[in-house]
Amino acid sequence: MSPVGPVIEATIRGKSYGARAVLENFKLTVAPGEIVALLGPSGCGKSTALRIVAGLDRDFDGEVRVLGQRVREPSSAVGVMFQEPRLLPWLSVARNVAFAVDGVEGAMPRVEALLEEVGLAGWGNALPRALSGGMEQRVALARALFREPAILLLDEPFGAVDALTRARLQSLLLRVTARHGTTVVLVTHDTREAVLLADRVVVMSAEAARRSVEIPVPLPRPRERLGAEPTVLETRLLDALGIAHTD
């Protein structure tokens, strides 16, 4: 049965690291199947908010609900993908994908299907050292999807690869999540990536107490890649970030 109402409801009244406030009065609500981008400068709390939603950081004032249930620890309903693939170098690709379960042999049909889906059919027995950076991120995506999560949280997953590989991984992400009906929250610094991927962009300020700005992206899918000049939506995002631009 499809979820009724928001799949993510986060209210973070306060989150600090020592004396430094990172998040104050931050709210995030995400609908089923929606792709939401968290956009903002380094240090504004994007990754911290993602970790809180994932149940990886519980030292905050507030409440997070996923699929109606209060988040108290990491959940199989939520997959997480980081900027670094974080593959275990001594395990094969297949065992990295199925790392969360015991008895990987019984999981092999699922692993093989996922590897085929991300374009790595036949690579299950390879070790991570045999892979390129883009291939490692494909393995990380397969691992994040292994437990069939309703929600996928992505912390700048394409920030460390070259532009061509980034474009291919972005397209792969859209295909795979659309096929599975996955809800996505994506952390990014890139206005162009936000416009290409997201249904809605939450622009966060470096000042913890400043209110976030939400900007919808009402563009039909599939979307064309943007040209050299900023679009109207990119300009709105740059304005919200307080970044000057030229006509």
Image (tube, rainbow, N blue to C red):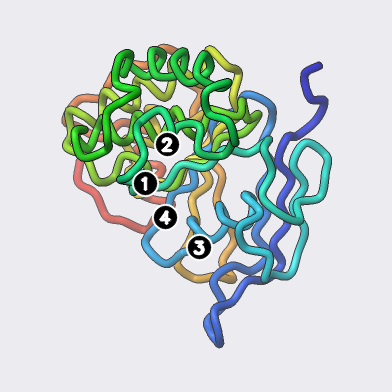
Q: Is residue 181 above or below residue 190?
A: above
Q: Are marks 2 and 1 in contact (CB under 8 Å)?
A: yes
Q: Is residue 20 above or below residue 143?
A: below
Instruction: Describe the element under mark 2 as helix, strand or loop.
Output: helix
Q: CA distance from mark 3 to mark 4?
A: 8 Å
- Circle 2 residues within 10 Å: few <14, some 14–19, many ≥20: many
Residue at which label 4 appears: 40
Sequence-earlier tag: 4 or 2: 4
- Determine whether, in the image, residue 123 is placed left or right of residue 36: left
Instruction: Describe the element under mark 1 as helix, strand or loop.
Output: loop
Q: Nearer the viewer, residue 239 or 38?
A: 38
Instruction: Describe the element under mark 4 as helix, strand or loop.
Output: loop
Residue type at mark 3? Answer: Gly
Sequence-earlier tag: 2 or 1: 1
Q: Are marks 3 and 4 in contact (CB under 8 Å)?
A: yes
Give the image location of residue 160, x and y in percent: 24, 46
Q: Is residue 19 above or below residue 75?
A: below
- Circle 4 residues within 10 Å: few <14, some 14–19, many ≥20: many
Residue at which label 2 appears: 96
Give the image location of residue 52, x and y in percent: 63, 57
Q: Nearer the viewer, mark 3 or mark 4?
A: 3
Sequence-earlier tag: 3 or 4: 4
Residue type at mark 4? Answer: Gly
Q: Which mark is residue 88?
A: 1
Q: Nearer the viewer, residue 145 or 18?
A: 145
